[in-house]
């Protein structure tokens, strides 16, 4: 992280700021010896710092029993607001387990927005953010009840697909002139895929992907005839991989068994995380269930899928962290042997589904896959050529693999939409609305054929008050309001820039030059 901070001048960034506070610290100072209190605060800070680091945020500074953390600087991620909320929920849960003479509780406030952010006092100094965003985060933390996370409306917009919220309405915050809408975060959503979480309410009409969809449906027909098919679906973020998979599922929803494994950017080093998540959803395991109830549900789900039900249930229960009494069959095995047998059982389960009915098996966002799940995936690819299983694997172009090029393996790279397709998509999004041709052309140019960008840019303009748009249309110095990057795309674009050495400087120079420049020899 220090290398990211070297020679970094203060800069304007959209970031998410977290403030965390230890509840009742004044009372604790009265009850505890100073040395005991210091040890307790150190343990509390360690828990908070670990949660922030786990989601790749940065602790900006500690102040007494308080903590400020940044998500989005010095390095951005495409989902910094989501990462901040995940980290905050982890803090609220884990602080209560800090060992000591008293049980600790905390409270957290989070806000997302534009700030000037930098490092004070040169290398090794604390970080600071100047602007309204950190002030709001601090006030939200003060307003929060013990063991509660409050977030601003800006953070809720960015993280709405990933969490369940309670709208607390408008609240007066000290030092903030206008009442602000405040949300309490209740829990993380549990859905099969990131796409389903982000599009729970509605979808825009599918544009420009009929050829690709027909290709997938053709492979599904071959699968039903008994020939296993593997489709490798590659494409840049936002180009429509998940939407295409969604359309495939919608077209054949009554036919197959469906196995959906969603890789996660937060668990790329957590062994078999996509499998664990899929199994918990499929077996309907609830966190509130006892181990006995969870094990009963698991055995019911696995019934008829494996040759050795007792060993299979014991192995999968261990994978899902379900405590069972009888582990005699596993006690003599080494950790590596347990892992190998678990992967073999998971492969057996996948193949067993296809013995009953044609099966659609999906591994999404494999660029985030953990090594153990990758091992399972490679086994599936090698074993399905004579089974009615269609395996769809989606990933970004930077993911590298050495999978065999068998006749049943098809690689398809999704390309950007053409200008006519972009035009059609914008019109579908507008429905009964309208935009000037100047604004229309600007969206086409800036979206660059990426469906996600088209949708977010168009939506941001639609949400702009009509009088503001009309004013921008007549102002030739500022062609339209949405020349600003929508906040929903800002983190994703900054993440790409931060991955490239000198990316920000290069982007600034390119922004001045424009898309077209004369060749210089």
Image (tube, rainbow, N blue to C red):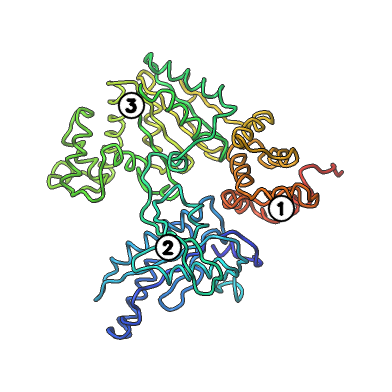
- SS class of the residue under badge 3? strand
Q: Estimate the x, y position of residue 72 in percent, counting from the top left.
A: 55, 58
Q: Is residue 479 above or below residue 1?
A: above
Quarter of the image for the N terminus: give it.
bottom right
Q: Tag 1's secondary structure?
A: helix
**Residue labelled with disc 1:** 506
Q: What residue did someone put label 2 on?
A: 150
Q: Quadrant of residue 444?
A: top right
The crowding category of the residue bearing disc 3, from other C-alpha atoms within 10 Å (few below 14, some 14 to 19, many at least 20), is some
Nearer the observer: mark 3 or 2; the answer is: 2
Task: Estimate the x, y position of residue 345 in percent, counting from the top left.
Answer: 27, 34
The residue carrying pointer 2 sits among few (fewer than 14), some (14 to 19) or many (20 or more) residues within 10 Å by Cα, namely many
Q: Secondary structure at mark 2?
A: strand
Would residue 472 be found to the left or right of residue 82 on screen?
A: right
Question: In this rendering, is residue 112 above or below 118?
Answer: above
Give the residue number, with chain letter if any, for mark 3. Answer: 257
**Residue drawn where x is 36% and y is 53% of the image:** 187
């Amino acid at each position: 992280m220090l290398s990211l901070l070297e020679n970094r001048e203060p800069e304007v960034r959209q970031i998410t700021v977290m403030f965390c506070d230890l509840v009742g610290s004044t009372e604790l100072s009265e009850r505890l010896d100073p040395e005991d209190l210091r040890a307790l605060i150190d343990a509390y800070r360690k828990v908070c710092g670990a949660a922030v680091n786990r989601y790749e945020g940065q602790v900006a500074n500690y102040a007494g029993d308080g903590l400020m953390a940044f998500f989005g600087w010095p390095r951005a991620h495409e989902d910094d607001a989501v990462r901040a909320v995940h980290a905050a929920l982890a803090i609220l849960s884990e602080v209560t387990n800090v060992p000591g003479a008293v049980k600790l509780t905390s409270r957290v406030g989070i806000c997302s927005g534009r700030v000037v952010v930098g490092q004070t006092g040169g290398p090794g100094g604390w970080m600071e953010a100047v602007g309204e965003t950190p002030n709001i985060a601090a006030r939200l933390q003060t307003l929060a009840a013990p063991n509660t996370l409050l977030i601003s409306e800006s953070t809720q917009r960015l993280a709405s697909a990933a969490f369940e919220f309670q709208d607390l309405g408008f609240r007066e915050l000290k030092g903030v002139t206008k009442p602000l809408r405040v949300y309490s975060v209740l829990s993380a959503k549990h859905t099969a895929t990131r796409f389903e979480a982000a599009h729970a309410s509605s979808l825009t009409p599918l544009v420009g992907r009929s050829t690709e969809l027909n290709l997938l449906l053709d492979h599904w027909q071959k699968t039903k005839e008994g020939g296993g098919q593997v489709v490798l679906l590659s494409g840049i973020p936002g180009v429509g991989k998940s939407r295409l998979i969604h359309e495939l599922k919608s077209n054949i929803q009554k036919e197959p068994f469906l196995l959906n494994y969603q890789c996660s950017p937060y668990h790329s080093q957590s062994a078999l995380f996509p499998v664990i998540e899929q199994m918990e959803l499929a077996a309907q395991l609830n966190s509130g269930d006892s181990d006995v109830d969870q094990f009963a549900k698991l055995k019911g789900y696995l019934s008829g899928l494996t040759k050795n039900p007792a060993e299979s249930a014991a192995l999968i229960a261990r994978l899902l962290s379900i405590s069972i009494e009888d582990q005699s069959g596993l006690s003599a095995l080494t950790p590596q042997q347990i892992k190998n047998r678990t992967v073999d059982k998971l492969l057996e389960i996948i193949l067993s589904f296809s013995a009953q009915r044609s099966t659609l098996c999906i591994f999404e966002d494999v660029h985030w896959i953990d090594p153990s799940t990758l091992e399972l995936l490679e086994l599936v690819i090698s074993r399905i050529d004579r089974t009615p299983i269609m395996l769809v694997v989606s990933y970004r172009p930077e993911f590298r693999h050495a999978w065999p090029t068998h006749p049943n393996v098809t690689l398809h790279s999704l390309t950007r939409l053409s200008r006519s397709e972009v035009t059609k998509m914008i019109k579908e999004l507008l429905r009964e609305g309208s935009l000037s041709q100047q604004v229309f052309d600007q969206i086409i140019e800036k979206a660059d054929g990426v469906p996600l960008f088209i949708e977010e840019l168009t939506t941001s303009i639609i949400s702009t008050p009509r009088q503001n748009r009309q004013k921008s249309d007549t102002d030739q110095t500022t062609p339209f309001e949405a020349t600003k990057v929508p906040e929903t795309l800002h983190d994703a674009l900054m993440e790409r820039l931060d991955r490239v050495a000198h990316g920000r400087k290069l982007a600034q120079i390119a922004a001045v030059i424009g898309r077209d420049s004369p060749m210089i020899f």
